[in-house]
Amino acid sequence: MGPKGILATLDTWRVTFRSRLEDRSGLALIATLLVVALVAVLTTVAITGAMSAMRSSGSDYQDTRVFYAAEAGGEATLAQLKIALADGYLSDDELTNMHPPSLQAISFDSFTVQRTGEATVETVTDGPYAGLYALTQNVDIYSRAANSKGDMAAVILRTKAQAIPIFQFGVFFEQDLEATNGPPMEFVGRVHSNGNVYLSSNNAWYRDLITTPNKIFHDRKDFHLVYNGVFVNDAAGNEVPLDFDSRTHAGAEAFKAESCAKFDCRVMTDAFEVDSLRLPLPDGVPPYELILPRQSDDGDAEQSVKFAWNSDLYITVDLTDIRTKQDVCAGGGPKKDPDEITGDLQITALQKVFAGAKVEFKILNVPCGEIDDVAVQVIADGNTIWTESDLENCIFDITIPSNAIDLKIVVTGDDDGVGTLINGTAYWYGLQVVNDLSPWPMTTITRVDGEIPNSYDMCNMFWWDWSSFYDGREKELKDVLNIDIAQFITWAAGGSSRTAELIYVEYIVPANIGGYSQETLNLMLDGTLDPALRILNAATLPNPMTFATEWPLYVKGDYNRYNKQPSSLAGDGLDILSNAWVDIQNKPPANVFNTCKNQVVAGSPCGSYSSWAAGWTKKNSLETWVNAAILAGHWPTPCDHEESSCAADGSSAYYTDWYGGGLENFPRFLEHWYNSSGVRQTLHYRGSLVSPFTSQKTTGTWNGTYYTPPQRDWSFDTDFRDPRLLPPGTPNVGYVIRTAMREAY
């Protein structure tokens, strides 16, 4: 191709290229438009995605908030469960009344708290209560929350509500435990001491574990004496003699090997790394607080466990305010108007009503003489003493028998048989009391709920007795408030509002009795004020009952023998008086009181009384039954005779007034436990023996002269393993464990 051809070809290419460029300029516009459109689409997608994400995030937030609300409902119930568990048992009503918290913009449209299965006994394996058993109740909490937009979430919390009752041992001593019984003693139930354990007897049988974080000694603590009649059951129930201890087998491995070989490891000491079992009490509450009265500075921890705060009938005996029996028990003396009226009768006396008085009575709401058949019946102590079938005058008079206690007047009348116009009964109570000017401490009753008895009924059920009887161990006359259960049952039959389950008695005592009148001192021959509480006529209890005081507590005769109820007795120390006990045989006779009149000085006994006390002798007893947990102090032997710092030298010289009395005398005795025929009498006891502290008021030492011990038939009451059968006011530590939680769909 020549030059011209080449130029022609280039021109062609140029024209073609220009043409293509012109064509492509249209495409660029289209491409630009496409890019803009694409960006718009992507922007829209991004905005839509962001908005969707925001909506999703908001929905997730609402879902999360509702879920946490449902969980909060369950957690709030855990706290309510612990409060309800303070008495050791969750009732159906308590569970039904539990409720979710109040949360803003949240409602709980479905919320239930339900017990699952029966209560079971479980051993606590770790924590401060390791080694104790807990009464465990499984509880499921269903909590469903919703917001106003309809978002809902639900959770199920599975929990264990556990209560650790103090009355779960056959025997529990916070300090050293000594058991050196003379007469045979068989004990069923776990025995534990946080101190050392001393065992020496010719006839003692222990059917369950014996445990201590310290030592077990086959010897007495007060002096050296080893008897070879102590038996402990092995796992198969065989009675195996105890013939070694922490001294003969001082090494841990040696003791463990011997215990496991002989008892299947059922005698355990520090060699087994046994933990000191912490009393089931809230932090910061010393054991003695359990029996102290209500105090203004008591916090929640004290109030949760003290018998005083848990009582439903609280008696205060104010021994700084000595009045007359008339003032305390009869509202100030004889009166004209009746104490009680039933029906539509209106009647009054024209003179004051008391035993031996001649009194005129006037019926106020009947036109006597204008109607027929107005009948009157006057009854004293259940015996009719005067009747009139057609009373002509509305005034009549009678002479009240000098020995009368209660007076009742029944009036009925009708108008020629047309209809009854009147039908009523009037009552005057305490006719012997109303003129009684003997010294009597001011006594009051307080209740949060329930009826408070009138003064006359109060003094019938809870009556005071100066120098009621002589305590040979304490060497003093006891000034006693008696609680008469038979009288209480009669009064309580008047309505359910009169029921009481935990009765606490507080004594307000003066710093000294120097301010007492001579009339009052004449009733205190030993020259000292020695308050005590005694329960009597209590073979049958009307319902579960607990009695508590910070002072000595005595039980006279059978206690809770028939129709057995959950019951406990708590005090500084506890004495059991047999069915044969009679006060009059154990207190100075009238001639001693007469001789001592105006001779008693505060802090100094009357000489005639001192002579009588020196000649006092223990009296025969009769077989007796007591069914109750006992929480009380004990008096310990001061020290172990093997310790170099101990004054005791290992001889029997350190026995009388040195030995604390041991387990066998933890419930104390004041009688010769033989009948008149010379047959040893048995004390049958079922309960739990708990001594968390040393006695502070019953400090008389043991010496074996003021009593002869009973045959002991003692056993742990296995009813206490059922939370529904624990005594009222049983101190517990309740805690709740969340075992599982899951979302419910």
Image: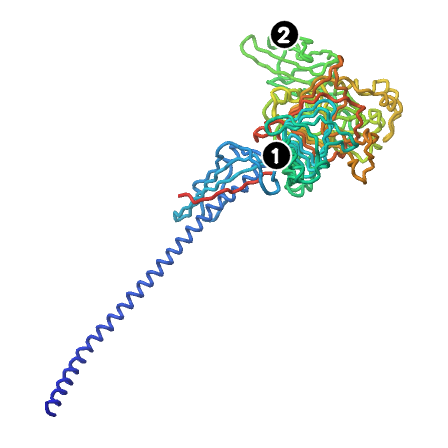
Relative to 334, does residue 313 appear above or below in the rendering? below
Marks 1 and 2, how far apart at CA: 65 Å
Q: Relative to residue 460, is residue 597 drawn left or right?
A: right
Spot occupied by residue 111 in the image (x, y as percentages of width and height): 46, 40
Q: Relative to residue 62, is residue 90 drawn left or right?
A: right
Q: Secondary structure at mark 2?
A: loop
For residue 395, which numbered disc appears in the image?
none
Marks 1 and 2: which is nearer the front?
Answer: 1
Residue 445 appearing in the image: no
Spot occupied by residue 548 in the image (x, y as percentages of width and height): 68, 30
Relative to 153, does residue 3 appear above or below in the rendering? below
Which image quadrant for residue 307? top right
Spot occupied by residue 182 in the image (x, y as percentages of width and height): 74, 24
Residue 230 appearing in the image: yes
Q: Quadrant of the N terminus?
A: bottom left
**Residue nearest the viewer, comparing 262 with 383:** 262
Q: Which residue is mark 1?
A: 165
Residue at x 63% of width, y 31% of height: 263
**Residue nearest the viewer, comparing 88 with 712:** 712
Q: Residues within 10 Å of mark 2 (few under 14, many from 20)?
A: some
Q: Mark 1 vs mark 2: which is more N-terminal?
A: 1
Relative to 98, does residue 346 appear above or below in the rendering? above
Q: Which residue is mark 2?
A: 390
Visual colour scheme: rainbow
Spot occupied by residue 505 in the image (x, y as percentages of width and height): 70, 30
Q: Residues within 10 Å of mark 1 (few under 14, many from 20)?
A: many
Relative to 40, does residue 1 appear above or below in the rendering? below
Give the mark count. Answer: 2
Inspect the image, locate mark 1, and give the three-letter code of the amino acid beneath it: Pro
Circles 1, 2 touching at the beta carbon (< 8 Å):
no
**Residue nearest the viewer, comparing 731 with 205:** 205
Inspect the image, locate mark 2, and give the three-letter code of the amino acid beneath it: Asp
